[in-house]
Image: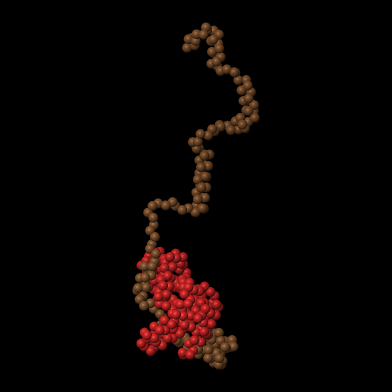
Chain colours: A red, B brown
Amino acid sequence: MPPSIEAGLIARAQAGDRQAFRSVVEHYQRFLYAVAYRYLGRADEAEDAVQETFVKLWKHFSRYRPEVPLSTWLYRILVNHCLDVGKSTAGRAQRNRQELSAALQIAAVDAMEWEHRETMDLIMEAASHLPDKQKWVFVLRDLQGLEVSEVCAILDCAEDQVKSNLYHARKKISKVLQPHQ
Amino acid sequence: MSDCPWEEQVWLFDELPTQQQAAVRAHVQECQTCGMIWHQAEAMKKIIRVLDPPQPEHAAALTHRVMNALPAPRKRAESWRWPRFSAAQALHATAVVLVLWFVLEHTGSTAPVAVHPHPANSVPLNTHAFVKKIYERKNKPQHSAWYARYQRLKKTSNGNYAELR
């Protein structure tokens, strides 16, 4: 879970203070980008998703209640946006993987870096074949490191459901990684 | 495909309470299948742990782009607008106005309403007064006092009414 920021800053941003909102953007941007990139697989789409998430937050900030952590609120907006994007660009995922692999082969200079990037590529390739729910649970819990309770709040589902999806996702991902271990 | 009922718990080891984790560890030592699954799960966690989270290439540029994408704040109109009232507020105001009007109408208002000094004795409410009024009207002299005087003078003068002045 990203570290929380000052409640007063959130309140000022909620009231329409653009400087305060900029601070909120700078604080949460990288966490949202990481999740968006891991789900969508492309840097430009991840940046678009992050931008749309913050724009939606700005427009509907009046609905936000401090009882829910702002990070959970932001992740929820991002998940909904990525699901909409994913539905419209399903066929692009396969081409993205191939482009990424080609780009990595050219760009990689360090063996360790290459190994990490290849592994990340493999994980993302495996995750792209998962159903949406399993993919989100895997990205949020295992890749992003969020707690199960927060994943439940973001995806609005019960803990049992999250754990069940996590079990299936881990099993499938591990099967893909096994020959490379 | 493993048939061991502990398989799911091995995969979800990190999500289990501490007591359950101890039980799973003990089982993994005894069950060969679960032992293999345990190693696979641990290897996957190790791989994921060393991966750096993806970061935007130009974070400052992304922030700038986000801020530019925000809608401009709406300017509030300078002209006066009708205040908005809820239905409850409008009903309350109407009730207050009606009560005030009623009170003013019936307590010392200057409206030209005839007030009878003795309402109980008025003709519409009192049968005796009603009958008396009819009798008086019937027995009332046909002519007024001026007319009677005129008739008297006519008899005594020759049409010259200068004496009357």
Give residue B3's quadrant in the image.
bottom right
Q: Is residue B33 left or right of residue A94?
A: right
> Is residue B86 visible to us here?
yes
> Is residue A76 visible to us here?
no
Image position, residue B88 (x, y; %)? 51, 53
- Residue A146 in the image: above or below residue B71: below
B131 or B16, nearer to the observer: B16
- Residue A79 in the image: above or below residue B131: below
Q: Is residue A62 left or right of residue B149?
A: left
Quarter of the image with the N terminus of chain B in it: bottom right
Residue sticking out furthest to the top: B158
Image position, residue B105 (x, y; %)? 52, 39
User: Residue drawn 51% across and 77% down?
Assistant: A132
Image position, residue B17 (x, y; %)? 53, 82
Q: How many marks?
A: 0
A76 or B116, nearer to the observer: A76
- Residue B29 in the image: above or below residue B100: below
A100 or A37, nearer to the observer: A100
User: Residue drawn 38% across and 58% down?
Assistant: B75
A63 or B96, nearer to the observer: A63
User: Residue drawn 55% across and 84% down?
Assistant: B8
Image position, residue A18 (x, y; %)? 37, 66
User: Residue drawn 48% across and 9% down?
Assistant: B162
